[in-house]
């Protein structure tokens, strides 16, 4: 019984660790979709949320890069 509990605990920890790498992924993908649909205002809002909610993640870095590009593009309008 003790061995079973330890195995289950290890599996749960592994699952949680795998999920943590995807922080903000769904929101980032939604922002990318909005950008492709020419809804840049909404895309920018979603990118900003990814950056603020998940700082230091790879998804936040991608979101910040896209925000920088979009901000430069909207300044000329």
Image (spheres, rainbow, N blue to C red):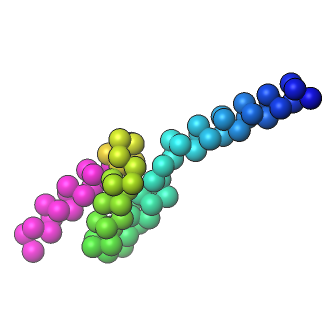
Q: Quadrant where the N terminus lies? A: top right
Residue 75 painted magenta: yes
Q: Residue at x 35, y 46 (%)?
A: 55
Please state which of residues 38 and 2 is positioned toward the viewer in this rendering: 2
Is 45 situated above or below 65?
below
Q: Is residue 45 visible?
A: yes
Q: Is residue 44 left or right of residue 71?
A: right
Q: Is residue 36 visible?
A: no
Residue 46 location in percent, x, y? 36, 65
Please state which of residues 6 and 29 is positioned toward the viewer in this rendering: 6
Please state which of residues 54 and 76 is positioned toward the viewer in this rendering: 54
Q: Quadrant of residue 38?
A: bottom left
Q: Is residue 77 left or right of residue 12?
A: left
> As drawn, which residue projects farthest toward the right?
1
Q: Quadrant of residue 33?
A: bottom left
Range shown magenta? 62-77
Residue 45 location in percent, x, y? 31, 67
Residue 26 location in percent, x, y? 49, 58
Q: Residue at x 37, y 70 (%)?
A: 34
Residue 61 painted magenta: no
């Amino acid at each position: 019984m003790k061995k079973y509990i330890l195995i289950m605990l290890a599996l749960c920890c592994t699952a949680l660790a795998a999920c943590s790498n995807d922080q903000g992924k769904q929101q980032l993908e939604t922002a990318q979709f909005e950008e492709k649909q020419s809804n840049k205002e909404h895309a920018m809002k979603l990118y900003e949320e990814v950056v603020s909610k998940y700082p230091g993640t790879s998804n936040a870095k991608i979101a910040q890069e896209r925000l920088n590009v979009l901000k430069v593009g909207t300044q000329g309008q």
